């Protein structure tokens, strides 16, 4: 094996391991960031929806229907203006009729009724399409009957762009770290293995020469450790002796000038 092959193989394997670890860490960080960022936006808009619901419930307690509240629509308009991530915000009453601001989904009244009926008052529904995430909070009247829901749709593309930007930053950082660690790993492996690799080359040359050398070749006592060097030298001496003995026996057994004599003399 050439002296440069060993450290390249070890270094290449080490770099692959480092790259795999970086990819795994980056994927986990990205997944965690995406989940956290989406959940934080959900929490933010849930707070807004709960504020609107609280005002509607207060109106219902005094017998004021959402459609009769003159301040409700201006409040929804102001909320949509202040939070640029809101695509639409509205209130759907018990009949499925929306009082809304923004590009509110034009669903049939029965579809809104089904959403309200399927959602408990202590939770919310959550859905999405290509453009928006939607959350809905139901509210009840004085008789503790569901009287409608507050619905907010917020920009999905805005969130996806923010998540994609973070993914690109993580990828760039991972590549930078990989380049740095690759250089350090290859340099470290080279300095750690260069002596060992050189000794392997010398041992290999010794083993290759033991069949043709006039005298048995030996390696230095420090090569690969004293025990290994001693075993190599013992093997070299024994092999050299056996080869010579075989050549001698062939010369004795073959008739002079026979077809194998020339070959035997060449091996000798």
Image (tube, rainbow, N blue to C red):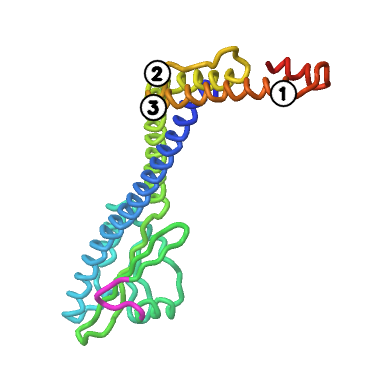
- Residue 16, which numbered label? none
Q: What residue does disc 3 label? A: 227
Q: CA distance from mark 2 to mark 3?
A: 8 Å
In the displayed structure image, the side of residue 141 where residue 173 appears, left or right: right
- Categorize mark 3 by other alpha carbons within 10 Å: few (<14), some (14-19), many (20+): few
Q: Please determine whether, in this image, residue 87 is positioned above or below residue 95.
A: above
Describe the element under mark 1 as helix, strand or loop: helix
Q: CA distance from mark 3 to mark 1?
A: 35 Å
Label located before the other in sequence (3 or 1): 3
Q: Please determine whether, in this image, residue 62 is positioned above or below residue 177.
A: below
In the displayed structure image, the side of residue 197 where residue 242 appears, left or right: right
Position of residue 216 measured from the top left corner of the image (x, y, whole percent) = 54, 16
Q: What residue does disc 2 label? A: 221
Q: Which residues are magenta?
A: 118-124
Res 245 → quadrant: top right
Q: Residue at x 17, y 80 (%)?
A: 61
Q: Residue at x 36, y 44 (%)?
A: 25
Label located before the other in sequence (1 or 2): 2
Q: Nearer the viewer, residue 226 or 44?
A: 226
Describe the element under mark 3 as helix, strand or loop: helix
Position of residue 128 measured from the top left corner of the image (x, y, whole percent) = 42, 63
Position of residue 26 measured from the top left corner of the image (x, y, whole percent) = 38, 43
- Residue 250, which numbered label? 1
């Amino acid at each position: 094996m050439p002296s440069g092959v060993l450290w390249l193989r070890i270094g290449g394997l080490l770099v692959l391991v480092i790259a795999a670890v970086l990819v795994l860490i980056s994927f986990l960080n990205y997944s965690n960031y995406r989940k956290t960022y989406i959940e934080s936006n959900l929490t933010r808009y849930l707070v807004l929806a709960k504020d609107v619901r609280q005002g509607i419930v207060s109106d219902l307690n005094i017998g004021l229907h959402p459609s009769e509240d003159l301040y409700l629509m201006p409040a929804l308009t102001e909320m949509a203006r202040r939070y640029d991530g809101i695509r639409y915000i509205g209130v759907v009453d018990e009949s499925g009729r929306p009082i809304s601001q923004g590009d509110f989904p034009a669903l049939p009244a029965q579809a809104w009724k089904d959403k309200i009926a399927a959602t408990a008052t202590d939770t919310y529904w959550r859905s999405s399409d290509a453009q928006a995430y939607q959350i809905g909070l139901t509210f009840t009247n004085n008789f503790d009957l569901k009287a409608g829901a507050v619905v907010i749709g917020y920009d999905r593309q805005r969130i996806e762009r923010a998540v994609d930007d973070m993914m690109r930053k993580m990828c760039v950082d991972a590549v930078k770290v990989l380049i740095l660690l690759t250089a350090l790993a290859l340099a470290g492996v080279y300095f750690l293995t260069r002596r060992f690799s050189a000794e392997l080359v010398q041992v290999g040359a010794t083993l290759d020469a033991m069949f043709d050398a006039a005298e048995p070749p030996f390696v230095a006592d420090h090569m690969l450790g004293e025990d290994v060097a001693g075993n190599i030298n013992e093997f070299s001496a024994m092999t050299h002796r056996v080869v010579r003995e075989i050549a001698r026996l062939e010369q004795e057994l073959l008739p002079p000038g026979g077809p194998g004599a020339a070959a035997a003399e060449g091996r000798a």
